[in-house]
Amino acid sequence: MGLRLMPLFVVAMIASCNPAADYALVGSAYVPGAHGDIQIEKIDKEQILISATLDHLVPPEKIELGLTHYIVWFTPVGEHPIRQRALDYDAETQVGRVSIPTSLREFDFQVTAENGETPNQPSDLLVASQKIREN
């Protein structure tokens, strides 16, 4: 009888863990082939870790001459965009990655193509975006 309860116990343990949430990330008209995902992991009571990967991401200069970086922005509901950081971009594999801790729970995740690493506001060259809503 103990062995019969074992699978139920294992399922209950797995279900009680907080698995990472997945959000799809699809490229815009500027990079229609780009796609990836966003993983959300709970760090502690107040912080979550946003980890995003974008594949098939052409070099920024191929979108428009003079562009050099892909920048991640968080836009809380009803507020202005907040620059986070540049994607770690590998032109050879055409993959961009980023991991950012935050206390925000509801915001728009955006990636824009920029002509520098520290713009004051996002350009109109939106590469990918996703609404993040976590409890």
Image (spheres, helix red, strand yellow):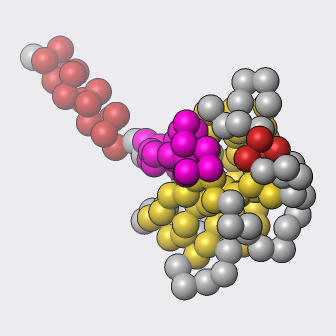
> How far across and down, in percent of the image, does residue 75 sit?
61, 72
Can residue 87 be seen in this snapshot? no
Q: Residue at x 73, y 68 (%)?
A: 122
Q: Nearer the viewer, residue 17 or 130?
A: 130
Q: Is residue 107 left or right of residue 81?
A: left
> How far across and down, in percent of the image, does residue 94 sit?
71, 30
Residue 82 vertical position relative to residue 1 in the rendered view, above or below: below
Q: Nearer the viewer, residue 2 or 50?
A: 50
Residue extending furthest toward the bottom: 78
Q: Residue at x 16, y 23 (%)?
A: 5
Work out which quarter of the rendered image holds the C terminus and state it.
bottom left
Q: Is residue 16 left or right of residue 114?
A: left
Write down the quadrant of residue 80 in the picture. bottom right
Q: Residue at x 29, y 27 (%)?
A: 10
Can residue 55 be seen in this snapshot? yes
Stretch of the chain drawn in magenta: 19-41
Q: Residue at x 50, y 70 (%)?
A: 106
Does the stretch in magenta take in 16? no
Number of marks drawn? 0
Residue extending furthest toward the front: 65
> How far across and down, in percent of the image, does residue 72 sit?
71, 57
Residue 8 vertical position relative to residue 15 in the rendered view, above or below: above
Q: Is residue 65 left or right of residue 106?
A: right
Q: Nearer the viewer, residue 19 or 113?
A: 113
> How far across and down, in percent of the image, does residue 92 sit?
79, 24
Does the stretch in magenta take in 37? yes
